[in-house]
Amino acid sequence: MRHLISPLDFSVDELDELLKLANDIEKNPKNYAHACDGLKLATCFYEPSTRTRLSFEAAMLNLGGSILGFSSADSSSAAKGESVSDTIRVISSYADICAIRHPKEGAALVASSKSGIPVINAGDGGHQHPTQTLTDLLTIYSLKNRLGNMTIGLCGDLKFGRTVHSLIHALIRYPGIKFVLISPEELRVPDYIREDVLKKNNIPFTELERLEDALPDLDILYMTRVQKERFFNEEDYVRMKDFYILTKEKLNLAKEDMLILHPLPRVNEISVEVDDDPRAVYFKQAQYGVYVRMALILTLLKWR
């Protein structure tokens, strides 16, 4: 039985197979419409989510399966003090596969150690978000036809942004990757990412404060919001939230074939006037999230 807790749980070859499967699902959806007939996905979401939870549910329904679960800790027995370990043991007798989101780092790993069914980490605190990473990889692979030999700008909240941390972990395994890390001093990537991931693996990177300085060199711009829920006080959040706003004017500095990705939700870090630019692919990215989660569910159930 396999779980997906970190994007590193799959080898590069396994990731390539997963992305190819997702591409085939996109092109031939009818071939997969009954692949999970009679099977159930449990979505255990201890914190709010729109895209991740609904894309998991859409993925399972598209495969012919059914869904059960909860959308907040308050609507589960966690409100009564039940542990993640006990919850997953119970859910293992109700469902065939489980997607879990939790505000505490490591919660999905704990769940997988006690589970009788495959567990997918749908986000744990500020740590990892592997299925968003799979979505990002599929978006880049589908639209650029490669995952290597690119300069990738990561902009915004690089300290708490679990999507950023997961994407860095995944992309360093491909050749010719260079990162430009764009953030204010207070929201720079954590030291363990800088030292243990980038420097240790000899990955070239630069750190900048101004988005305008980075734009001309980028093949991919990955925007993130400043996450209010990760801040300990309102004053720090208000000071940081408008630090970066991507506008149509700033895009004049970028390459014609640069892609703009965003894990969403957007607050105001990308102006709505950018939405009509052909380089803006964040809504298409959300659609790719359904295909890749369909591929992941099929892959993990095959290994059960």
Image (spheres, grey):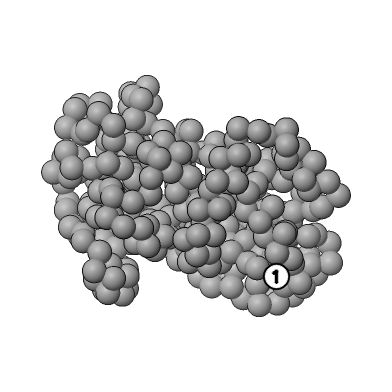
The residue sitting at 66% across, 33% down in the picture is 28
The residue sitting at 62% across, 75% down in the picture is 110
The residue sitting at 58% across, 44% down in the picture is 22
Residue 215: percent from left, percent from top: 19, 40
Q: Quadrant of residue 102?
A: bottom right
Q: Quadrant of residue 72?
A: bottom right
Relative to residue 267, is residue 172 depicted above or below? below
Element at badge 1?
loop
Q: Looking at the image, can residue 201 be seen?
A: yes
Residue 199 or residue 185, whichever sits in front: 199
Residue 233: percent from left, percent from top: 36, 60
Quadrant the N terminus occupies: bottom right
> According to the image, label 1 marks what residue?
1
Residue located farthest toward the left when viewing the structure as drawn: 213
Quadrant the C terminus occupies: bottom right
Residue 61: percent from left, percent from top: 74, 41
- The amino acid type, in three-letter code, at marker 1 is Met
**Number of disc labels:** 1
Relative to residue 210, is residue 236 depicted above or below? below
Residue 103: percent from left, percent from top: 53, 64
Residue 42 or residue 117, whichever sits in front: 117
Q: Looking at the image, can residue 6 be seen?
A: no
The residue sitting at 21% across, 59% down in the picture is 205
Q: Is residue 114 left or right of residue 280?
A: right
- Are there few (<14), some (14-19), or many (20+) residues within 10 Å of tag 1? few
